[in-house]
Image (cartoon, helix red, strand yellow):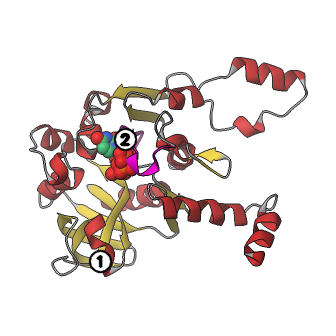
Amino acid sequence: MRKIRKAVFPIGGLGTRFLPATKSMPKEMLPVVDRPLIQYAVDEAREAGIEQFIFVTSRGKSLIEDHFDHAFELEEAMARRGKSLAALDGTRPSPGDIAIVRQQEPLGLGHAVWCARRLIGDEPFAVLLPDDLMVGEPGCLKQMVDAYEELGGNLICTEEVAASDTHKYGIVTPGAQAGAITEVKGLVEKPAPDVAPSRLAVIGRYILQPEVMNVLGSQEEGAGGEIQLTDALARMIGQQPFHGVTFAGKRYDCGDKGGFVTATLALALDRPDIAPAVRAFLAAA
Ligand code: UTP
C-alpha cells in the first residue's frame, strides 16, 4: 500500500461568514490564540507523515504564502535581540515542501481539490479543510492514516451531529460498524433531518484515491451551483473500499463565528500562560 505523502488544503473559498474581517485577509489566517487556522492543519498533517503540502488558493491569499516563508528581517532582528525563534516553529518548511495552485474561480470544494490533480498524479492523498480545527492525540489525520494502513481505499472523517444539523453536512448511509470505523454505503449532501439516512456527518478530513480526480473532472455542478466533493465521493462508493473514521478528539467548526470563538476559549483554557486570566474573566461574566 502506498504511503500518504501529499495533502491538499482547499483554501480558495471567499470566507463570507467572517466579513468584514476577511475582506482583505484570508479566513485561514484568523488566529486561534496565537496560531493561524492554516497552521493547525499543516502541523496536524506533518504529524501524520505528510511531506508535500499543496495549498489551493485564490486571489488575496498571498499572506498564507508569506506565513510559511522565511521572514529574514524579523528573524535577524529577533536573533540580534537574543530572542528565541521557537515561536516561528512550524512556519519555515524546507524549500519545495509547499506548493501553491490557484483556483481561479470559487466553483466549489470539489473543484478546488481537482485543481491539484497535476501535483497529486497517481498516488493517494489527504485533504484537510483548515476550518475544522481538530484537537486530539494523536491528531485527526494521524488517526486516519493509521486506519488507512489497515483498510486502504477511501476514508472520510465522520462525526455524529444533532438531527437539526444534518442539512449543513454530507451525511453517511452507514453499513457495518466496528469501533471507530463505519462502512460507507452512500453519501447524501445536506439532507433535511426527516430524509437524512443517519446523523453521521462528513467533516473536513479525507484520504482519497487518485481516481477521484477523474470523477471530479467529469462532474456537473451540484447543490449551490458548485462542484461538490461529496457528489464525487458518492460516485466512487462500490468501486473502491469506502469507510468513515470517527475521530477520537474534539472538533471546532471555525468556519462559523460561534465555533471560532468557542475554539479560542477552549484552547486558551488549555494554555497555562493565559488560562488564569481567561478563567477569571469567565467566572466574573
Ligand atoms: P465553505 O463552505 O466554508 O466556504 O468552504 P467559504 O467560502 O470558505 O466560507 P463562507 O461560507 O463564505 O464563509 C469549505 C472549504 O472549501 C474551500 C474553503 O476555502 C474551505 O476550506 N473552498 C470552497 C474552496 O477552496 N474553493 C471553493 O470554491 C469553495
Question: Considering only vertical position in the picture, is 227 above or below 163?
Answer: above
- Look at the image and say whether residue 186 sits in the magenta stretch: no
Q: Main secondary structure of the magenta part?
A: loop
Label 2 CB sits under 8 Å from any ligand 1 atom: yes
Disc 2 packing (10 Å; few <14; some 14–19; many ≥20) = some
Closest to the camera, between mark 1 and mark 2, is 2
Residue 79 visible at all: yes
Q: Which residues are magenta?
A: 1-20
- Report the residue at 12% width, 55% height from top: 235
Looking at the figure, which quarter contains the C terminus? bottom right
Q: Quadrant of residue 262?
A: bottom right
* Residue type, mark 2 in image: Leu
Disc 2, SS: loop
Residue under label 1, please give it.
Answer: 199
Q: Is residue 16 left or right of residue 39?
A: left
- Look at the image and say whether residue 18 sits in the magenta stretch: yes
Mark 1 → mark 2, Cα distance in angstroms: 28 Å
- Report the residue at 56% width, 43% height from top: 39
Residue under label 2, please give it.
Answer: 14
Label 1 CB sits under 8 Å from any ligand 1 atom: no
- Report the residue at 27% width, 37% height from top: 106
Which residue extends farthest front?
A: 20
Which one is nearer the viewer's eye here, 147 or 111? Answer: 111
Q: Give the number of the disc on residue 137.
A: none
* Residue type, mark 1 in image: Arg
Whole-percent x and y of residue 156?
Answer: 32, 60
